[in-house]
Image (spheres, rainbow, N blue to C red):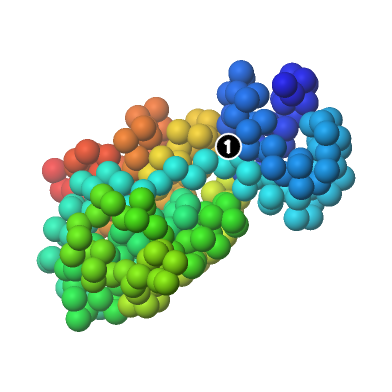
Amino acid sequence: MIPEYIFNELCDILYKNSGIIIKKGKQTLVINRLHNRLKFLEMDNYKDYLKYLKSYGTNNELSIFIDCLSTNMTSLFRENHHFVHMNNVLKNNKSNKIKCWSSACSSGEEPYSIAMSAESILNENFSKFKILATDINRTVLEKANEGVYYNKDLCKIDSSFKLKYFKKNDDDSFKINDIIRKSILFKNLNLNDKIPLGINKFDFIFCRNVMIYFNKDLRQKLINDISMFIKTNGYLYLGHADSIGDLEHNFKSIGETIYKLKWFYST
């Protein structure tokens, strides 16, 4: 086990640099996720690793540490009602450019699901649909950028989508096609920092299953940022476990974990 004072220091470093909270009693989780890193560094205990992290944390080790401890559970078309709603909106969208932000894209399943859904509706107009996909974890971003998945990853998607949007490789893996891949820009981003997304605003923002790992102050910061980056008639999609009920915000619930700015409504 990790001594409690070392566990607390590791959790404090993680929180200060990412906003991610690991609750008390989760030493086993930390052990499991850091085990391979300690093995790679040929270290026998977490005291030595903590010292190493403090010494070299300003360089690459801090990023590796955050990558190890960030959660990246995802799947294609997870919480599918969001994609159904987005498609209904797209059917009536006459804009020349449509922008979407997948704020915690993990290994790419969310932005690729967004892109496939949009392409199935927009067809020849799909070139106007662009996605910014961000994540704090550089390792999963590399996987996302590759766009390679396996049968176990694709087992729950419609067979027509699998045939249309994926190409089978020689090793029985499947690679997302170029039309879908080129619609997405992957970028490393820490939602705990100032978000440098410029003045461009998004028609759709997916921020799903992120806030559950943040405290109230950081959730408030994030919802404030989202308010700045979403169009007046844009849509915000949260995860089923996320909540903004205790925050100050200008969003109105219009469906299951689907939100729109309140001032868009005249009544």
| Relative to 163, residue 136 above or below | above
In this orientation, which residue lies closer to the viewer: 226 or 123? Answer: 123
Q: Which residue is mark 1?
A: 20
Residue 5 in sight in this render: yes
Crowd around label 1: few <14 · some 14–19 · many ≥20 (10 Å): many
Report which quarter residue 101 is drawn in: bottom left
Three-letter amino acid code at disc 1? Ile
Question: For the C terminus, which image quadrant?
Answer: top left
Which residue is at a point 48% across and 67% down the rendered structure image? 146
Which residue is at a point 42% across and 72% down the rendered structure image? 170
Which residue is at a point 19% across and 42% down the rendered structure image? 254
Question: For the N terminus, which image quadrant?
Answer: top right
Where is residue 155? Give x, y as percent.
28, 51
* Residue 103 relative to residue 237: left or right: right
* Residue 244 relative to residue 57: left or right: left
Where is residue 67? Give x, y as percent.
62, 48
Which residue is at a point 49% across and 58% down the rendered structure image? 134
* Residue 220 relative to residue 194: left or right: left
Report which quarter residue 246 is drawn in: top left
* Residue 115 relative to residue 256: left or right: right
